[in-house]
Image (cartoon, rainbow, N blue to C red):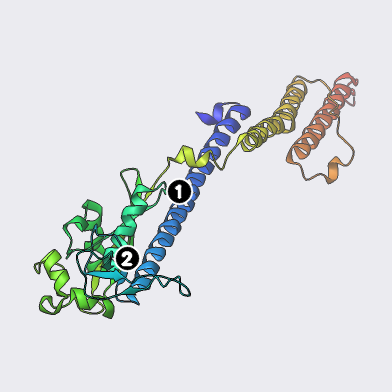
Amino acid sequence: MLRNRSITLQFSLIFLLALALVGGAFYLIMDHIYRSQLKSQAETVADNVEAFGTWVAQYGRVWVKDDNRSYLGHLALAKAPEPAVVDTQAKLLPVAIKADEELVHFFSKNPALAQREYSEVVEKSSSPAKFRMTSHNFMNPANTPDEFESKALDVVRTNRLKDYAEMSGGSYRYARTLYMKASCIACHGVADKAPLDVKVRYGTLRGFGFKEGDVGGIISVRLPTKSFWETSINVIGPWEIALLLGALVIAFLFIQFSVVAPVKQLTMAAEKISVGEHVNIELSAGTEQSSNEIDHLAMAIQRLGTSIHLATQQLRKLGTAKPTPPPS
């Protein structure tokens, strides 16, 4: 049984148990802080994506020069000849174009298309945070949701949540719910009323039927995660470990010199008293006013030894005294 072991061993086991509990608490705290940081980073990414989409939406569409990778609408302009003397700024004029004229092409992007191209640029960049937009009723097959995104879409729609997150496959996955705005309905409302270029590019089978306020989809953010040890090593360094070991050494020295050693001395004194020896326990000044339990034990053993010594002397005196003769 543990009770039959030495105080030093008992203290060591209790100290290690306490250290394990502290380590468990530290793990939970670190995990909570780390997840909070990941969520904060993911929310910042989603905020930026929404802000970019809002900027595009306020113009309905944006037009970019000479970028025909993907577009919704095309406008070819003729470049007017540059004036010889005063105005050196080229003017773009929507005029009838002849085959031999220099052309400038502009291609339109709606908010969703602009955000998708933005996500593609980020995907190829060195940024650890990646994102994309997807929906349960996606228009572009390239936006088909993956396993996490399908689950997130079901959860946010069923439980009416604004976001959803989980750790999955070495990544932190975060989904921000997107609600349909009035500016979105022009392309994603009734299919027959959608712009012709949208219907020509994506067809009319998917991506329609939304109303303002409906859950339109999610912004899906992906962040790489680190293991607990990789995270902890950034928090606990050599100095912190040295302080923990110092605390352990101090605790052992305290229990050894303040508890174990005095108890051993008092045990030896009690054994001597038990065989009739007189023992004088050295008590420090102010022991009677001490709040230390070992000091109280030392005083009690000292008093017990004195009492036994006096009683022994008294018995010896009685044993050596001559008996009184009986009266005749």
Image quadrant in which you'd find residue 176? bottom left
User: 247 left or right of 176?
Assistant: right
Q: Which is more toward the observer, 248 or 10?
A: 248
- Check whether the beta carbons of the residues at disc 2 and disc 1 lie within 8 A of each other: no
Q: Which is more toward the observer, 44 or 48?
A: 48
Tell me the residue that label 1 is attached to. Answer: 31
Image quadrant in which you'd find residue 158? bottom left
- The image shows a total of numbered marks equal to 2
Seen at 90% across and 21% down, the residue is 321
Residue 286 seen in this snapshot:
yes
Seen as rendered, the residue at the extreme front is 84
Q: Position of residue 62 (x, y in %)?
A: 32, 70
Q: Distance between the Cα atoms at labels 2 and 1? A: 45 Å
Question: Which SS class for mark 2?
Answer: strand
- Mark 2 or mark 1, earlier in chain: 1
Tell me the residue that label 2 is attached to. Answer: 64
Amino acid identity at mark 2: Val
Compared with residue 28, is residue 299 higher up or lower down, i.e. above or below? above
- Mark 1 Cα-neighbour bin, 10 Å: few <14, some 14–19, many ≥20: some
Question: Which SS class for mark 1?
Answer: helix
Q: Position of residue 235 (x, y in %)?
A: 56, 43
Q: Position of residue 213 (x, y in %)?
A: 26, 78
